[in-house]
Amino acid sequence: MNKVIFILFVAVFSNLVSTAQTKIAHINTSELLSVMPETKKAQEKLQRVQDSLNGVYSELITELREKDSIFTADSAKWTPTKREVKKGELSDLYTKVQGYQNEAQQYLQQKEQEVYAPVQKIALEAIQVVAKTNGYAYVFTREALIVAPASDDLLPLVKKYLKIPETPAVAPKK
């Protein structure tokens, strides 16, 4: 009987010891991504794409406004047939502008995923390496937790691993 109690005690104690040794950390991934130089490059690339798309959109809007102005000013002088043809052209151009706007939005979203995926991959790999190197069994994103047990902040270690200089905290303005 004493042997059974002793074995049970050893099993429970070893389980408690192994649980006590489990290291938990958290990281604010949004903050990490915001300080990575790769993020700035990705933002610049995405901005160039957006500027290009906006340029085409502006040209389409200018064309639509010009044709609408002509239609408004001159349609009273036109024959009913010409008025209907021009009205159809104006409607087609309006549909083209709407279609372009939708396609541009989808393209920009696709490009955003394409541009940021490598940055996110670098961040994830760095978190994994730092966690493994420092013996962390679990790393949670700080944004996803409302209530959590005390854990170590992995952000400074990941910044150090990625060679991102620490930025001093900004004092609140009075």
Image (spheres, rainbow, N blue to C red):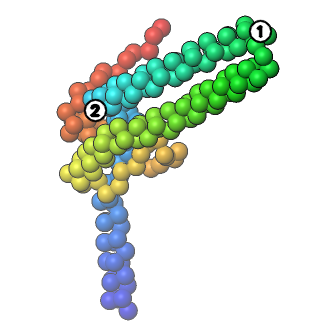
Categorize mark 1 by other alpha carbons within 10 Å: few (<14), some (14-19), many (20+): few
**Above or below 149: residue 46:** above
**Above or below 77: residue 10:** below
Label 2: which residue? 38
Tell me which corner region of the image, top left, top right, bottom left or bottom right, holds residue 8: bottom left
Which residue is located at x 46 percent, y 37 percent? 107
Q: Nearer the viewer, residue 71 or 103?
A: 71
Q: Secondary structure at mark 1?
A: loop
Label 1: which residue? 77
Q: Position of residue 65 (x, y in %)?
A: 63, 14
User: Does any portion of residue 105 appear in the rendered image?
Assistant: no
User: Could you tell which of marks 2 and 1 lies nearer the N-terminus?
Assistant: 2
Q: Secondary structure at mark 2?
A: helix
Q: Position of residue 139 (x, y in %)?
A: 36, 51
**Above or below 113: residue 54:** above
Q: Position of residue 26 (x, y in %)?
A: 38, 45
Which residue is located at x 41 percent, y 23 percent? 52
Which residue is located at x 79 percent, y 10 percent? 76
Alpha carbon distance from label 2 to label 1: 59 Å
Q: Nearer the viewer, residue 23 or 13?
A: 23
Identify the amino acid type marked 2: Glu
User: Does any portion of residue 31 appear in the rendered image?
Assistant: yes
Identify the amino acid type marked 1: Lys
